[in-house]
Amino acid sequence: MEQTPSCRVETALEILTGKWKPSILLELITHDTLRFSELKRHLPNITQKMLTAQLRELELNDIVHREIYQVVPPRVEYSLTDYGKTLIPVLHAINAWGEKHVDHLAQKEMLQETTASSASDSF
Amino acid sequence: MEQTPSCRVETALEILTGKWKPSILLELITHDTLRFSELKRHLPNITQKMLTAQLRELELNDIVHREIYQVVPPRVEYSLTDYGKTLIPVLHAINAWGEKHVDHLAQKEMLQETTASSASDSF
DNA sequence: CGGTATCCTCAAAGATACTG
DNA sequence: CAGTATCTTTGAGGATACCG
């Protein structure tokens, strides 16, 4: 319960870090609701174990809602909670900076001509 | 060079993650310029090895500038580059969300009275 | 003072197999 | 379909000692 700036930044970053959490969150932002298997299809390299684990952590932090339909075969849908949606502007800021940074890195590699790159996606 | 949103977010997060990078960056934001030993003093639990390693990574990404004064005893000063300063708004957004989240977590633990907490620091 | 060089630990992530 | 259960791997981070 320190509440120093770095405590707050680290607390926030704990939500976002985890190898797959940014991808999962971005999928849920753009698709709104996804079943477990759909999420897995969108993230081809993730294992079931990791997908489950990361989703559980996000759920524990109230970022993600897990809706279970008691049918056969089972159907489980994931979506952002309202609280989770407050993360969107943060991800947006990170995304925007990341785009600049990828360009910045590219410029370092080839210090010659600057290929004008495309404008930012909405996300 | 994929340039998908999650690629960009992950690229940006690579800069910020690392156990000590947020703290180091916040120190450099608030103090402007710090010697190696001053930085170490502000971060009591970091080892020299980790401090060096994290600073080197930040330097490689053009976030931090390392100025060496050839004197005895050696003097090395660290500061944010102009490019590194573009991270400040991002850290600010993360910090602001982190503050809300610490409150959010606190509310989950004691679901009783809401102690009105202090307003946000400048950082 | 401001670092390297080694060695070690442990937890996050991956591979694989099984299940209600 | 949507998960567990195990086992193994990897590498970030830490402890400690030494150096220009």
Image: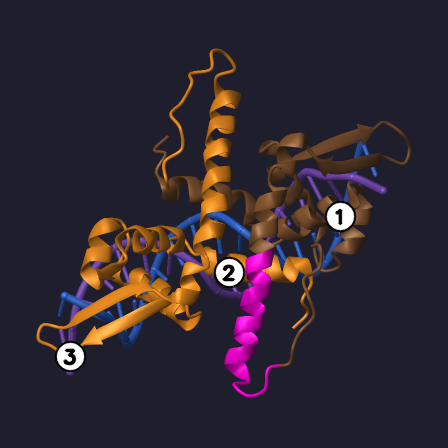
Chain colours: A brown, B orange, C blue, D purple
Q: Specify whether A13 is left or right of B119.
A: right
Give x and y (percent) for residue B83.
43, 66
Give x and y (percent) for residue A113.
59, 86
Amino acid identity at mark 3: Gln
The secondary structure type at the circle numbered 3 is: loop
Q: Nearer the viewer, residue D15 or B82?
A: B82
Which quadrant is the C terminus of chain A positioned in?
A: bottom right
Q: How far apart are marks 3 and 1 (CA)?
A: 53 Å
Residue stretch in magenta: A96-114
Task: Name the chain under label 3.
Answer: B
Give x and y (percent) for residue D13.
38, 55
Query: Dividing the picture into quarters, in which one does residue A70 lie?
Result: top right
Task: Name the residue at the top extreme.
Answer: B113
Q: How crowded is mark 3: few (under 14 residues within 10 Å), some or many (20 or more)?
A: few
- Mark found first going from the N terminus, 3 or 2: 2
**In this orientation, does residue A63 appear?**
no
Q: Distance between the residues labelled 3 and 2?
A: 32 Å
Q: Specify whether A21 is left or right of B50.
A: right
Task: Name the chain under label 1.
Answer: A
Q: Residues within 10 Å of mark 2 (few under 14, many from 20)?
A: some
**Residue that badge 3 annotates:** B70
**In this orientation, does residue A47 appear?**
yes
The secondary structure type at the circle numbered 1 is: helix
Assign the magenta stretch its main secondary structure.
helix
Circle number at residue A30: 1
- Tag 3 near tag 1, CB within 8 Å: no
